[in-house]
Amino acid sequence: MRNLSPLVMFALVSACGGGRFYVDPSGGLEAYARITLRNAGAPPLAARLFDDAVTCTGLVGLKGSVPSGQAQAIYAKKGEPLTIGAFFWQPVSRGLGTCDMTTTVVPTAASYEVVFESDAEKETCRVHWAEGGGKSARRLPRSWFVVRKSSQPFLESGSWCHPLTEPERAALGVTRPAGAN
């Protein structure tokens, strides 16, 4: 949990996505996995995606935020890495803070649900993934996804998370070097 001044928070909200926003793919959705982002926390959830999921570059924002108890669906190409950065703004003992969760996965199934939770009293947040959705969703083990450490680049075009380690690359099946397209 990080503390932020209201001015820094405003700058982050204003800059998130840099005006580039996620758009659903047109047609051919059988090649895509439907990812439902569910907010199980109290404050609104903001999320960001990346053109390059391995390097966390090419920031793409979701329009608006996901209210508490609500969900928003996106589509991701099956078999290709996807990195989702999500964060809550919530009151903490020392002011206003963010709880940032960034995960990388390689979706292969038709649909997934990713649940973001926060606990303002404990100043914590967590994320978990499930294959499918609703009551038939099967929670996936922590080894199925990689939790990335977020970073704040000097320029928006920089990397928004730390590089994948070799064991993380192997676990995800990512073979291309960072930055190679």
Image (cartoon, grey):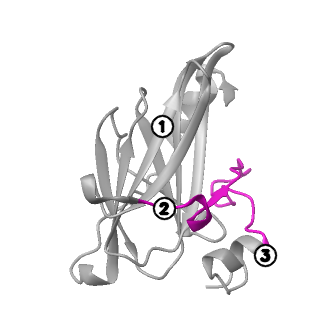
The residue wearing badge 1 is 117
Compared across the picture, whether 90 is left or right of 132 comes to right
Gap in angstroms between the C-alphas marked 1 and 2: 16 Å
The residue wearing badge 3 is 166
Q: x and y percent of residue 24 in the render?
A: 29, 66
Q: Earlier in the sequence, mark 2 or mark 3?
A: 2
Stretch in magenta = 139-166
The residue wearing badge 2 is 140
- Establish if 95 lies above or below 163: above
Q: x and y percent of residue 51 in the render?
A: 52, 69
Gap in angstroms between the C-alphas marked 1 and 3: 28 Å
Q: Earlier in the sequence, mark 1 or mark 2?
A: 1
Main SS, magenta residues? loop
Using the image, tell me which numbered label, if any, was put on residue 174. Answer: none
Q: x and y percent of residue 90 in the render?
A: 53, 23
Q: Badge 1 local density, few (<14 within 10 Å), some, or many (20+)?
A: many
Q: Quadrant of the C terminus?
A: bottom right
Q: Of residues 150 and 14, which is closer to you in this image?
A: 150
In the orientation shown, which residue stands out farthest toward the right?
A: 166
Gap in angstroms between the C-alphas marked 2 and 3: 22 Å
Asked if one can make out residue 6 in the rendered structure from this viewpoint, the answer is yes
